[in-house]
Image (tube, helix red, strand yellow):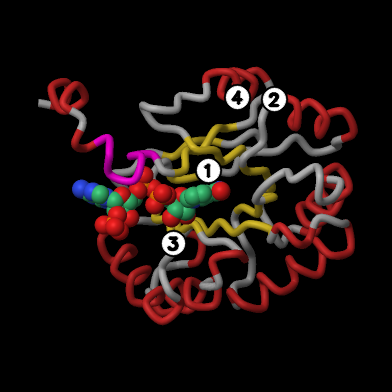
Amino acid sequence: MSAVPDVTLNNGVRIPQLGFGTFQIPPEQTREATLAALETGYRHIDTAQMYGNEKEVGQAVRDSGLDRADVFVTSKLDNGAHAYDDALRAFDGTMDALDLDHLDLFLIHWPLPGRGDFTETWKAMEEIYRSGRAKAVGVSNFQPPHLRRLLEGAQVVPAVNQIEVHPYLTQDAVRSFGAEHEIATEAWSPIAQGKVLGDPVIAEHLA
Ligand SMILES: NC(=O)c1ccc[n+]([C@@H]2O[C@H](COP(=O)([O-])OP(=O)(O)OC[C@H]3O[C@@H](n4cnc5c(N)ncnc54)[C@H](OP(=O)(O)O)[C@@H]3O)[C@@H](O)[C@H]2O)c1
């Protein structure tokens, strides 16, 4: 049994609460790093089109010898693909790069309302979800006004909103909004890139 608890998303999909992030891992090191994470016991790997290492994440998952069903893989839509057709095409690119039969979670990486219409992008995300190729779809870096606007025309409620959350940035308003609407909040930079571990107040409580 895994030591990491699961969180059940609003569509019943279960996501391991602790994930291995691959931001800033150069592609040539990603397969090895991801394989090491899987060997250590991680069962949730987080990548993105923007990270340029989806191919190597997919290689590691395939090479790990683990059942595909036992590994949760997330990727995220590139900021340049904020349009219905572009988003569908970009998702095809993710699936080609990963070379896996399905993706567990696909997120809009950033809302960027000045760059495109994320409600149109969301229609593509819903289409991707209905196709079954992504078991869940969600968003990242959305604040309550973005979420409100998205939900006005949405047929599928985002399963996840991945945002920066740690003791120095608690994001109470977004987390409450998520809880009210069954959108799970997932933290990025959960240890504030190491700063949390050196904080004397936090260290005192961990001791
Ligand atoms: N959706 C988004 O927009 C978004 C944005 C950012 C990140 N993310 C995702 O979230 C993941 C995690 O983000 P993050 O890397 O910023 O988060 P983090 O877990 O808060 O920071 C990890 C970094 O902290 C440093 N660190 C210092 N002391 C450490 C210690 N004792 N143990 C472990 N790490 C220590 C390490 O830096 P060194 O490597 O230099 O040692 C490590 O890379 C990313 O990989 C990515 O998948 C998503």
Query: What separation in Å lies between label 3 and label 1 (alpha carbons)?
Result: 21 Å
Q: Residues within 10 Å of mark 2 (few under 14, many from 20)?
A: some
Q: Quadrant of the C terminus?
A: top left
Query: What separation in Å lies between label 3 and label 4 (alpha carbons)?
Result: 24 Å
Query: What separation in Å lies between label 1 and label 4 (alpha carbons)?
Result: 21 Å
Label for residue 174?
Answer: 4
Magenta region: 190-196
Which label's residue is closer to the chain start, 3 or 1? 1
| Cβ–Cβ under 8 Å for marks 2 and 4 | yes
Which label's residue is closer to the chain start, 2 or 4? 2
Percent position of residue 37, x then y: 32, 63
- Toward the viewer: 41 or 172? 172
**Can you identify the residue that label 1 sits on?**
14
Residue lying at 62% horizontally and 77% vertically, measured from the top left: 97
Query: What separation in Å lies between label 3 and label 2 (alpha carbons)?
Result: 27 Å
Q: Secondary structure at mark 1?
A: strand
Which label's residue is closer to the chain start, 3 or 4? 3
Compared to 27, does 76 lie above or below? Answer: above
Q: Secondary structure at mark 3?
A: loop
Percent position of residue 39, x then y: 28, 66
Q: Residues within 10 Å of mark 1 (few under 14, many from 20)?
A: some
The part of the image, by quadrant, that contains residue 200 is top left
Percent position of residue 73, x then y: 53, 59
Which label's residue is closer to the chain start, 1 or 2? 1
Q: Is residue 70 visible?
A: no
**Can you identify the residue that label 2 sits on?**
144
Name the amino acid type tagged 1. Answer: Arg
**Can you identify the residue that label 3 sits on?**
22
